[in-house]
Image (cartoon, rainbow, N blue to C red):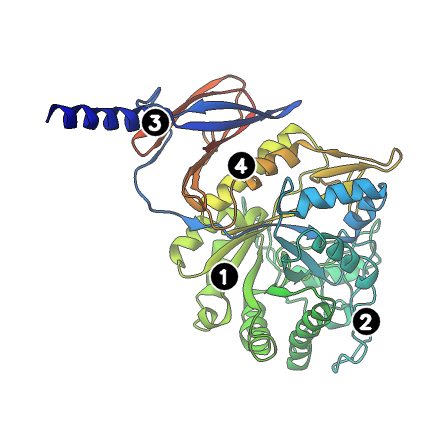
Amino acid sequence: MRTRTVILLFIITFFSTKLSAQQLTWTVSTEGKAWEQSKTKLEKSAGVTPILKIEGDESIVTFKAWGTCFNERGWDALNMLPRNQQESILSDLFSPEGDLRFTMGRFSMNANDYARDWYSCDEVSGDFELKYFNIDRDKTTLIPFIKAAQQYNPELTFWISPWSPPSWMKINHYYSVVSNADFNELNPKLDYLLFEDNEKTYDGLFPGKLAVNDYFIQDPRYLQTYANYFCKFIDAYAEEGIPVTQVMFQNEAWSYTPYPGCAWTPEGIIRFNAEYLAPTLKEQHPEVDLYLGTINTNHFEVIDKVLSDRRMPETIKGLGFQWEGGQILPRLREKYPNYKYVQTESECGWGSFDWGAAEHTFNLINHYLGNGCDEYTFWNAILADDGVSGWGWKQNALIRVDSKEKIASLTPEYFAVKHYTQFLTPGSKVLAFKNGKEDKLPVMVVKNTEGKYVVFAGNYTEENKEVTVQLGEQYLNVSLLPHSLNTFELR
């Protein structure tokens, strides 16, 4: 009996010691010192009041995919580099063993603001049979870019959205929504079409004024041709070995742009999606999911009006959010819990390429995944010099190319992304999060596909912060460096 007791005590002591000594790999990045790794361990008691507690197995969402966008100016930037650097970058972005491990790509149907110039796949006015439709332009830019990525991950999936329909399908007969003497040739008189004499404005909301007209011609013949156009585009890319699995009808319908864009009203959105695009996709491409997006407005009442139409549950599978749209994501998800939710474009900043951009992106990921998005798409992975768009907007990228020296550098934002993508793999469950809006201490806990905890934590303050995260009956007690990004992976 005594022997049994000794053995039992030994087992209890052994497992208690093992439990208390569970180790984690701690990866920390600060400005100028990225990706430093050390070891820490879980403890039996809390150092300070836990900032986040995990006490059960409930989860917010099962994560599906990280992705990025394929744009012409990104392809041009990549091709400024020697071949060996190009291959190294593509491997880091898309290889399952690389740094960022993207498994999903987004690209534009027709030109966007990071195209070399404006174009569409059919600019023959009145071509309702789409006889002259082609992707010849894409075969020289986007398709080589995508195929280069597929060399490192043949299982990449893709989704699409247009910035602008062909110009002849729009009421102003031009790619852009509004005129700009420096960047387009649109007649300024046509700007009147956007608001007419409507003077109603909305303080604190984006946009401050809402369009009163659909810029896509609301004639059945045009609407059906455009739905067919989507399907021809999907067919053409399938022939190139590039599968499109998801479609969104319009990029940022609430950005009234001097670059390619298209304004839509709620009535026009419902009409096109419910009566034309969804039925046509169902008939010609039932394997392709239709999502409502990309939503970049915080006018809750506008999106609610679309979703409250009785046909929408049979029309769309989910919703996609970016920019101001992220502000109404929690409220929409609460009211419409049966849809899938995805993030569609990480915010690109103003060409600063600095540590502030890294913190901003780290926080965005926390917000979108914590509020139930199962996909996250980054914008330009690579740009040259100041990252200037086709209409003069300087934007950030994960990799920056010096066009004179032919050298690429990893930006701070690259490491912010790596902090998540290296450890939060598809199939992981997002368990809980705390945003950093008030105290500048965003935290998220996930359980990876091996059933082990991973903790993501940022400290955007000027001083060290003592932080405790409760993981079941144990505690992660750490001191986070000022302006640091941190990942803790249980081993």
Residue for badge 1: 318
- Residue extending furthest toward the top: 463
Which x, y percent locates residue 155?
Answer: 63, 58
Kind of residue indicated by mark 3: Lys
Give the spatial CA distance, label 2 vs label 3.
68 Å
Q: Quadrant of residue 217?
A: bottom right
Q: Residues within 10 Å of mark 1 (few under 14, many from 20)?
A: some
- Please tell me whether mark 2 sits on a helix, a strand or a loop: loop
* Mark with earlier residue (2, 4): 2
- How far separated are the C-alphas under marks 2 and 4? 41 Å
Q: Earlier in the sequence, mark 2 or mark 3?
A: 3
Residue contact at pointers 2 and 1, CB within 8 angstroms: no
Q: Amino acid at mark 1?
A: Gly
SS of the residue under disc 1 = strand
Query: Helix, strand, or loop for circle 3?
Result: helix
Compare marks 4 and 3 and give the one earlier in the sequence: 3
Q: What residue did someone put label 2 on?
A: 123
